[in-house]
Image (cartoon, rainbow, N blue to C red):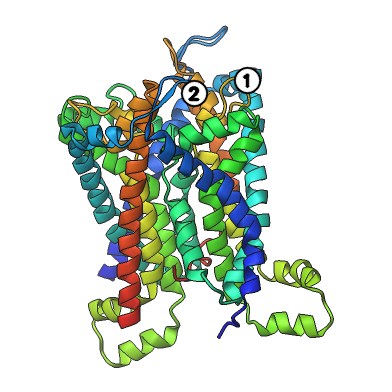
Amino acid sequence: MQPFDNRAWFLLLPALLLLGVVGALPLLAVFNYGLHDIFTLQDVHWVGVEWYDDILGSGRFWASLGRSLLFSTLALGIQVPLGILIALMILPLGKRAIWVLMLCALPLVVPWNMIPMMWLGLINPESGLLGPGLAAVGFDWKFTAIHTWALILAMDTWHWLGLVVILSYAGLSAIPPAYRQAAAIDGASRVAVFRHIELPRIAGALTIVFLLRFVDSFMIYTEAFAINAGGPNDATRFLSIELGEEIKGFSYGQSAARASLYFLIVLSVVWAFVVVTRRREVQG
Amino acid sequence: MIRTLVRVAGLLALAGFILLPFAQTVMVSFTATMPHPGVVEGTIGLVNYRNLMATPELRASMLNSAVYVLLNVALCLVAGLPAAYALARYRFLGDRHFLLLIIAFRVTPPVVLSLPVFILFAQIGLVNSPVGIALVHCLFNLPVAIWILSSFISAVPPEFDETAFLDGHSRTGFFFRHLIPAIAPGIGVAAFFCFIFSWVEVVFARILTVTAGKPITMAINALFGFQTDMGLVMAMTVLSLVPGLAMIWFVRNHIAQGFTLRA
């Protein structure tokens, strides 16, 4: 048991100071801007919650929210099971699993603005390695919404699968061999081993995976915008793309209100998730 | 037997999926996509890499990126180590809340904070400076560093600390001479994740470099124009991967160790 000592707070001071300057202060500023109409930094008027009324009353906001939620659901639904499956598959490889982990980590080091360029190059009908083949089967990411979605999802999976694999593998490889031997003696099926031994041990790592992947997919901007700028017909117009448009249009007050709103949505989902997982930990 | 076959097929499919975009990029980077003096369009060769090295802005951008990324890694480790030690070794009033707080900062979307960060940093003169980017990247990297480091410190038995104190080491002496060597792999993994997340980030890097100090990501963006030399863009992309690949190689044996702490 760790000793109880409130002086430990002194050790947190540098971290708190840093996060205060780059996190808390700007957050307060965003909330404040969101309550004002800002023409220039000198010409500012109080408008209260007017921006929030505007945003929540617009159909476009709710449509974008729906699209972003759908995208996050699909991204998590594909990447988490696939990542766990790969981690389970490479577990018996022992030391050689490191090579697969390194392979999976490769896309993580690509600058985010280059990822869509690489993929657009890959599917270019004239010069891409996959281009001619995809064009032959009628793949048209410019004008067919479902194809644009498929492309962005494939790209996002390519980008982030490695993180899921690494975190799941970390949890799985930490399970003492005795657990599996005991299960083998009991004649437990593969599914039962996963459900009762492996899953509980990687629950902690999976919580983090869920949170990180939820936030990043929910607020996807750089990659999605470069593929089709929200098109065709707004079919990939996610929440962050609307915010980006407002910032580019110098509508500071409204974009700040929108940013605060997004932050609150993200925070409430994260909070709900943490509360649910903690409650389950206490029960289990 | 069948199981091995399925596994091999699965791994080959995975390798194909991950490597295809890289193959395309490397291929284009060695192709002259535009006519250059003495080089016909479509020739295979090093022309793009030669042009890249001959452009001062592109060379400078690599240096700019390297400076703020290294600075960010240093900041995260210096502020993260004591915090991670406190979380791994002590219980204190509000420790759970501190964990929630850093999770909240890690999940704050950069695009939400881009505007006030720009205004704040403009007032204190940190726009166009690598220090500004290094500071703001702590928003998402410091929580990750604290999380990884404290799970590595937790893995060291507390008796290790006590023996050092009994031997007459001061707290700082213990920190530098005993704890840091003991968790060196953890520091490597934390540095790896801070490094790559800072290296690939574009939202803050874009808004904080208006006229100068452009990082490699923005230098690549600037290459796009009326007639884009895709070969040059891809050569630059390939170069931008090199530091990340080196980092993967350095931490390969420890990459999957630092994630055992429960949130």
Report the number of discs: 2
Label 1 sits on a secondary structure element that is: helix
Going 42% across and 66% down the picture, which residue do you hit?
A169
- The quarter of the picture where the N terminus of chain A appears is bottom right
Q: Nearer the viewer, mark 2 or mark 1?
A: 2
Going 20% across and 46% down the picture, which residue do you hit?
A70
Horizontal and vertical percent position of residue B154: 58, 75
For residue B37, which numbered disc appears in the image?
A: none
Horizontal and vertical percent position of residue B52: 60, 21
Horizontal and vertical percent position of residue A245: 33, 25
B72 versus A181 height, above or below: above
Please state which of residues B128 and A102 is positioned toward the viewer in this rendering: B128
> Which residue, given by chain and number where applicable, does mark 2 sit on?
A41
Label 2 sits on a secondary structure element that is: loop
Going by the numbered disc 1, the residue's amino acid type is Glu
Going by the numbered disc 2, the residue's amino acid type is Leu
Residue A76 in the figure: left or right of residue A21: left
